[in-house]
Image (cartoon, rainbow, N blue to C red):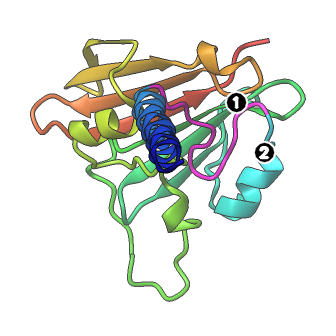
Amino acid sequence: MRFWRCASALGVCLVVAVAVAGAAAQGADSSARANELTLAGLRPGRDTLAKADSLYKAKNRLPAPASHASPVWLDICARRSLSVELDDKGRIQSVALSSLGLEALRGDCSKKGYHPGARDLWRTGRGLKLGDPRDRIIELYGEPSSSGPSTKEGRELELLFYAFDWAGSEVPQVLEVSCDRSTGRVVEITLAYPSL
């Protein structure tokens, strides 16, 4: 009887050990294939311009040079921009954060009440933000689907591209992150829903 108790206890320990190891492996695997649902507090494919205006204030939105132009908000003090692309129903199809070409922006940041929108939302749902090091991208999303050199606003960049088609068609499908090649820091992040 004592032998069977020991054997049973050993069996339970083995089952628990295998389950823990499997969960750890699955956890490591899922972090390597993490998808993203939001950028700047907005979810492409679901949220509308009204939500963006409520978070970042319609009064802070730049006047559009054309009716089809993407709405843009600027945070002059942090030298960054937020833009969204909309479908014909006003639903957000992509969200982009950028610090490119904004180095020369100047404004009175000491004004009481200056509020360019919820500052803590200028990041992905997993916490990636402009200025983060390239290693942080890999830590959060794993290795990119593809990467390569790029240029924009006269700067040499590295573009990291993540395809999330494996996560299902109801979630954003693409995350693009650009890093400045000289500093290795994130200068642009775009999250997009599949085009209909």
User: Image point 63% across, 52% down: which residue?
Assistant: 41
The number of discs equals 2
Q: Quadrant of the C terminus?
A: top right
Residue type pointed to by label 2: Leu
- Horizontal arrangement in the rendering, residue 85 relative to residue 83 (left or right): right
Q: Position of residue 56 (x, y in %)?
A: 64, 60
Q: Residue 15 in the image: state x and y as whole percent.
A: 51, 37
Place residue 185 in its image quadrant. Answer: top left
The numbered disc on residue 66 is 1
Q: Does 35 appear in magenta?
A: yes
Q: Is residue 122 visible?
A: yes
Q: Earlier in the sequence, mark 1 or mark 2?
A: 2
Q: Is residue 144 magenta?
A: no
Q: Using residue 178 as the reference point, say whether residue 31 is left or right of it.
A: right
Q: Which mark is residue 49?
A: 2
Badge 1 amino acid: Ala
Residue range (magenta): 33-45
